[in-house]
Amino acid sequence: MFSVKNLLPGSKKTAGIDIGSSLIKLVELQYTSEGCILHSFAQVSLERGVIEGGLVKDHDALVKKIKELFKVSRSGAGNVVTALSGHVVMIKKASFRKMEEEELRELIIDEAGEYMPFDDIRDVNFDFHICSERRLDPDQMEVIIAAARKDVTESYAYAIEKAGRRVAIMDVDSFALETAYEENYDFDADDTIALVNIGASITNINIVKDGESVFTRNILLGGNSITQALQKKLDVSFEEAEMIKLEGPDENDNSEGGSLDYLEPIFLEIARSFDYFSSTARESDISRILVSGGCTRIPGITDAMKKKFQCETELFNPFQNIAYDTNIFSPSYIKDIGPIAAVGVGLALRGIENK
């Protein structure tokens, strides 16, 4: 898949670190002859304002939390695979004549202005993935390009290295979801699946067909916007609104706070993304939605999405094909953390792939 910034080979133990705006999650996997096994999982909360819009705003606070995360997890991993998110990452799909990867890389650099909205390619880290051959023109190939400014990637690398670890790979969270999906789900060539990760401040959408990404979009709405909507509607504090959100609606309550109507702004943006995909893609309609992220803790959200989008909807299970020691992790705990661990699992799998 993607490696926006590949700093070193994966020679040591590697952990996936999913840095969100409200939580940091660590996933460490071990590969055995029988497949992958979960070795470590931990999460620590992150104060509001440390990460905003995918940008690091307080490096010292982030360094402190990364150190805490490794202490809590007891992970001995020296290398880290992490990911960028939101509008700090540019993702573009383009068509090219068939060529070798090195020639393609040189072409993208030479004609960077056509493919990447940056003033100077020297300020950018980028990578690309060649998709399956275009069915309508065998002489063409479709390519997904991912790019981010070096100062953004380096800000994350700086915090991780100040915490005593080294960055092996800088991925993109949407594609980390795809990696976790490929490892854990069987799919047919005609399956078109929407991977929807609703975090605290960003919602990632990655639509995959036959296990390969065909559409991505990041929406700058997430759990915080839901909490703020409840806060305004019920005239309560942010913390009180957060508690109400996680308690879910009272089925017997007909007041404004007694329904999931506060999800509508996010649902509307997801619907617009689905509609755009359907209007521009040759692929079939979306057959299933796998939803992940912290907002999956909102009671009734999967049923609400199923009703809204008239599509089979279920929680993303990134441990479907990944074993774990029941003496360390109970089945109920694994079920509980699954949807919020999806990106981290994908990142940890990237670490295994690159060893």
Image (cartoon, rainbow, N blue to C red):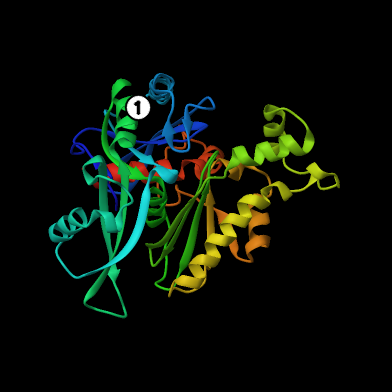
Circle count: 1
Q: Residue furthest bottom?
A: 136
Name the residue carrying label 1: 75
Q: Residue furthest front?
A: 119
Give 190 or 38, whichever is nearer the viewer. 190
- Where residue 1 appears, as percent x and y from the top left, is 29, 53
Q: Name the kind of residue labelled 1 in the image.
A: Ser
Is residue 31 shown to the viewer in this render?
no
Quadrant that contains the C terminus: top left
- Where residue 75 appears, as percent x and y from the top left, is 35, 27
Name the side, left or right, on which 121 lies relative to 211.
left
Q: Label 1 crowding class (10 Å Cα cut-off): few <14, some 14-19, many 20+?
A: some
Give 21 or 303, whichever is nearer the viewer. 21
Q: Residue at x 32, y 27 (%)?
A: 160
Q: Quadrant of residue 165?
A: top left
- Is label 1 in a helix, a strand or a loop? loop
